[in-house]
Amino acid sequence: MERKVFIFEKTVYLTDTNAEGNTYFSRYFDWQGMAREEFVRTNVPGLVAILQLGVKMITVEAYLHFIQETFLFDEILIDVKTSNIKKASLDLIFTYTNKKTNQLIAKGRQKLAFADATSRLIPVPEEIRKNAMYFLFKEGTTQGAEK
């Protein structure tokens, strides 16, 4: 199975910056959430039906390692990959890159779990698991490695 690529594009706006003119740190987590939601929306055709059944997507852990600052009107590419797909959870890997300079900006990760309408943990829904496999990044390999 050949790995697909998913890139979420984000431009830094005034609302993303602080008094010093660089991007406020919490915005990177906001962008991670936006990229996650767009990734799932785009790649899981039955997402609305899954959510209508009461399935909840839960962020169990979130991590971000800052490498390079961003500033007003920088264009950011966020590459989203999957990793560590287990019965009841999966990881999303985020690589933030400056579109113009190709500089690595940050690396992030989220561990996702799923719950039913009663908030009881459930296995990763099959349609999500199946589609996540196309974006799998195997740690320790160059597959999907940063530029």
Image: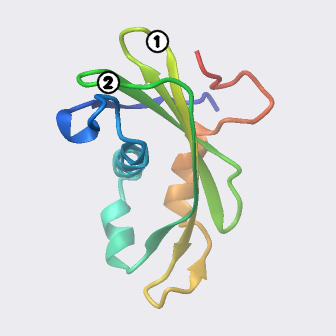
Q: Element at badge 1?
A: loop
Does residue 121 appear to the left or right of 87 in the view shown? left
- Relative to residue 101, is residue 134 depicted above or below? below
Quadrant position of the N terminus in the picture: top right
The residue depicted at 53 percent of the width and 67 percent of the height is 125
Does residue 61 appear to the left or right of 28 in the view shown? right
Q: Identify the residue under disc 2.
A: 71
Q: Identify the residue under disc 1.
A: 102
Quadrant location of residue 120?
Answer: bottom right
Name the amino acid type tagged 2. Answer: Phe
Quadrant location of residue 60?
Answer: bottom right
Mark 2 or 1, nearer chain start: 2
Does residue 113 appear to the left or right of 14 in the view shown? right
The residue depicted at 36 percent of the width and 60 percent of the height is 46
Q: Horizontal and vertical percent for residue 101?
A: 42, 8
Among all residues in the image, which is located at the extreme bottom? 118
